[in-house]
Image (cartoon, helix red, strand yellow):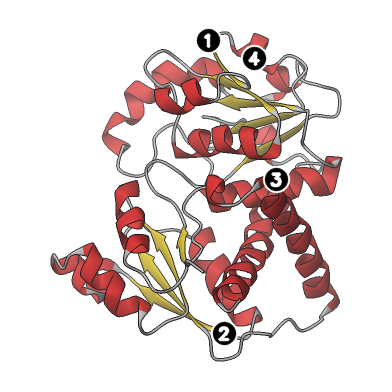
């Protein structure tokens, strides 16, 4: 049996993804009840970070520890990748010593090349094109608060970035309609939109896109590596801010999410961040539980 990887949501079937979300909620309950889930003693997760992160490192490292294993943090300065060793060579070496690898990097081709030469499962913890781990947490959060997302309407606001691309994959895998509201020149990948035209539509009118939506989602306007474009992006995307006025156009029970870190009063208003009924903090915590479910599934598949 070939090694299973998690580079995009499309690497798992819809049934596998939904089972993973169910398991994430079970692990969340067990964690809160103090029930041990240390079924992987001695297993090692290698965490390769070319891009820094708070939530990704903490959630994966804590999650692996809670599963009974160990997480090893590797920055570019800690490995030969930072000195020009081919990705393929690094993959062969690291995967011969650990049980699973998590990579947070720039080009999506890096995780694809690493996975192609890895003996163990590889997890995409973010690339310039996709952020599938965040989508697991988002889908878990919606289900815990509102039930299945299938058949619902989701509105993405702002930059057509890696999160937006992963929401396009999620629309297919979890069976919902996605409306992408973005300014001209900031659309998501054209090929992804074309492949999913039956459920994905790009809007310029933000209120039209938000009308009746069950979930509103946004992200920073300038991602890591785009800091020099901050002013231009902020000017173009100002009309696409997630705020109370826009939320009032959505369904009466609509949720709103942000993968964090947030720039308050830029892509999302501060009052929404601080509302007592926001699910953003649940969404952040669910990174831990969704990724524990993912690690468990991949390790079990590797031993099947």
- Mark 2–mark 3 Cα distance, whole angstroms, equals 26 Å
- In this rendering, which labeled residue sits more in front, label 2 or label 4? 2
Percent position of residue 44, x then y: 48, 83
125 shown above or below 45: above
Dot 3: element: helix
Identify the residue at horizontal 24%, vertical 63% (top origin).
87
Q: How crowded is mark 3: few (under 14 residues within 10 Å), some or many (20 or more)?
A: many
Q: Which mark is residue 195?
A: none
Residue 186 image-quadrant placement: top left
Residue 83 location, x and y as percent? 14, 68
Q: Distance between the residues labelled 4 and 1?
A: 8 Å
**Considering depth in this image, is 74 or 97 the residue closer to the camera?**
97
Residue occupied by mark 3: 139
Q: Is mark 2 on a helix, strand or loop?
A: loop
Q: Report the residue at 42% width, 82% height from top.
A: 98
Name the residue that disc number 4 marks: 209
Q: Residue 150, image x and y in percent?
A: 77, 34
- Which residue in the structure is indicated by mark 2? 69
| Image quarter in which the C terminus is found | bottom right
Callout 4 crowding tier (Cα within 10 Å): few <14, some 14–19, many ≥20: many
Q: In this view, does 65 lie to the left or right of 112?
A: right
Q: Percent from the top left, x then y, of residue 259?
A: 57, 45
Counting residues from the N terminus, which is met first, the one under dot 1 or under dot 3? 3
Mark 1 vs mark 2, CA separation in Å? 47 Å
Give the Cα distance between marks 1 and 3. Answer: 25 Å
When the figure is inspected, residue 102 is found, relative to residue 220, above or below; the finding is below
> Of residues 44 and 10, which is closer to you in this image?
10
Find residue 204 and name its label: 1
Contact between marks 3 and 4 (CB within 8 A): the answer is no
Q: Which of marks 1 and 2 is in front?
A: 2
Q: How far apart are marks 3 and 4 (CA)?
A: 20 Å
């Amino acid at each position: 049996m070939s090694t299973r990887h998690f580079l995009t949501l499309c690497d798992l079937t819809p049934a596998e993804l939904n089972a993973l979300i169910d398991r994430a909620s079970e692990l969340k309950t067990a964690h809160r009840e103090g029930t041990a889930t240390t079924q992987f003693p001695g297993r090692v997760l290698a965490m390769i970070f070319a891009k820094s992160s708070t939530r990704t490192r903490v959630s994966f490292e804590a999650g692996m520890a809670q599963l009974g294993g160990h997480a090893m943090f590797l920055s570019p300065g800690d490995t030969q990748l930072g000195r020009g060793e081919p990705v393929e060579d690094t993959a062969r070496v690291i995967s011969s010593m650990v049980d699973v690898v998590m990579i947070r990097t720039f080009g999506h081709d890096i995780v694809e090349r690493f996975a192609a030469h890895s003996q163990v499962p590889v997890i995409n913890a973010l690339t310039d094109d996709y952020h599938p781990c965040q989508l697991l947490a988002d889908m878990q959060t919606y289900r815990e608060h509102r039930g299945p997302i299938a058949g619902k309407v989701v509105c993405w606001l702002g930059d057509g970035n890696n999160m937006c691309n992963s929401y396009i994959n999620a629309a297919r895998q979890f069976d919902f309609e996605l409306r992408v509201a973005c300014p001209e020149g900031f659309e998501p990948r054209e090929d992804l939109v074309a492949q999913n035209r039956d459920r994905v539509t790009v809007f310029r009118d933000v209120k039209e896109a938000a009308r009746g939506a069950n979930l509103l989602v946004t992200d920073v306007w300038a991602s890591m590596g785009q800091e020099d474009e901050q002013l231009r992006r902020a000017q173009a995307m100002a009309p696409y801010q997630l705020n109370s006025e826009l939320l009032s156009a959505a369904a009466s029970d609509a949720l709103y999410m942000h993968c964090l870190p947030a720039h308050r009063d830029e892509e999302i208003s501060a009052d929404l961040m601080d509302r007592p009924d926001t699910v953003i903090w649940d969404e952040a915590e669910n990174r831990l539980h969704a990724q524990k479910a993912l690690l468990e599934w991949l390790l079990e598949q590797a031993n099947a």
